[in-house]
Image (cartoon, rainbow, N blue to C red):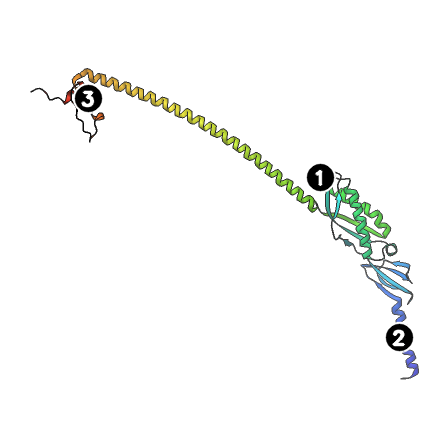
Amino acid sequence: MSRFTIILLVMLVAIAGIISSSLFIVNETQQALVVQFGEPKRTVSEPGLKFKYPFIQDVIFFEKRVLSFIPDEGEEAILKDQKRLKVDTYARFKIVDPLRFYQSVRNEVEARKQLDTIVDSALREELGLRGLKEILSEQRNLITKNIRDQVNIKARTLGMEIIDVQIRRADYPEVTSQAIYARMISERERIAREFRATGEEEAQKIRATAEKQRVVTVAEGARKSQEIRGSGDAQAIRIYAEAFGQDADFFSFYRSMEAYKKSFGQDDTMVINPTGDFFKYFELPPQ
């Protein structure tokens, strides 16, 4: 290989290196910042093939798309009614000024740290003016809008724009939740005791009414039975009287037989002197 050929190849390689170092491509989802020795020189937001000074200038790319930001842990805020609430949020943001973004936070990692502090501060400030009912009502959209506007004021100074801030979940801290749960149990037990006491009172009333009704029913039954028995006795006396009037001797004989039947058992043995009117039917008739 000749010396001329070698020199030509070296020149071609050098030219290729210069061209490669002078060109860069910006995608549609990206925006770029050209820096020279760490000092920003210009921003590029339009996609396509772009030029820069070779070797002395570098290109830093930033996302043009909407980015999401979700804090690792929920923030605990004190509401207007002094209740503590643990709130999980998420935000969406865009890098709208690459130069200011680079000068303020340098990269997305540091930007998310800054947003965490800004969102936390705005969240505490807004929720400190609200009660729990407002957070759980239709005013929740207004609350998140106010938080977004507050965050945007500071985020724009960092070259970012907050698209949206939302409250994913709002719940009591663990200690507060346990206390509320204990109060709920106590309240349910109190209500159960009231129901049991009311039920026992009603049961006593029902038992008293039933007992009263029983006494009245028994008394009424006894009265009716006395009336029936008295009517039966009167009718029996009347029948006896009629029978006695028809045949006094037979009636006396019949009454004596009934008396004997009630007085003497089947296996009874009596040694007596059969005298007197009660034993007159034990006497033999005269021959």
Q: Quadrant of the N terminus?
A: bottom right
Where residue 42 sits: x, y (%)? 90, 59
264 lies left or right of 212: left
Q: Which residue is at the far bottom?
A: 1
Label 2 CA crowd tier, 10 Å (few <14, some 14–19, many 20+)? few
Disc 3, disc 1: CB below 8 Å? no
Residue type, mark 1 in image: Lys
Q: Quadrant of the C terminus?
A: top left
Q: Is residue 257 above or below residue 121?
A: above
The kind of secondary structure element at disc 3 is helix
The kind of secondary structure element at disc 1 is helix
* Pair 2/1: label in front: 1
Residue type, mark 3 in image: Ser
Where residue 46 sits: x, y (%)? 85, 59
231 lies left or right of 204: left
Residue that carries the numbered disc 1 in the rendered image? 133
The foreground one among 139 and 3 is 139
Q: Which residue is at the far left?
A: 287
* Pair 3/1: label in front: 3
**Among numbered discs 3 and 1, the one appearing first in the sequence:** 1
Residue type, mark 2 in image: Val
Q: CA distance from mark 2 to mark 1?
A: 71 Å
**Among numbered discs 2 and 3, the one appearing first in the sequence:** 2
Disc marking residue 256: 3
Q: CA distance from mark 3 to mark 1?
A: 99 Å
Disc marking residue 13: 2
Q: Is residue 179 above or below residue 26?
A: above
Q: Is residue 33 above or below residue 211?
A: below
Q: CA distance from mark 2 to mark 3?
A: 159 Å
Which residue appears at 63% of the width and 40% of the height? 184
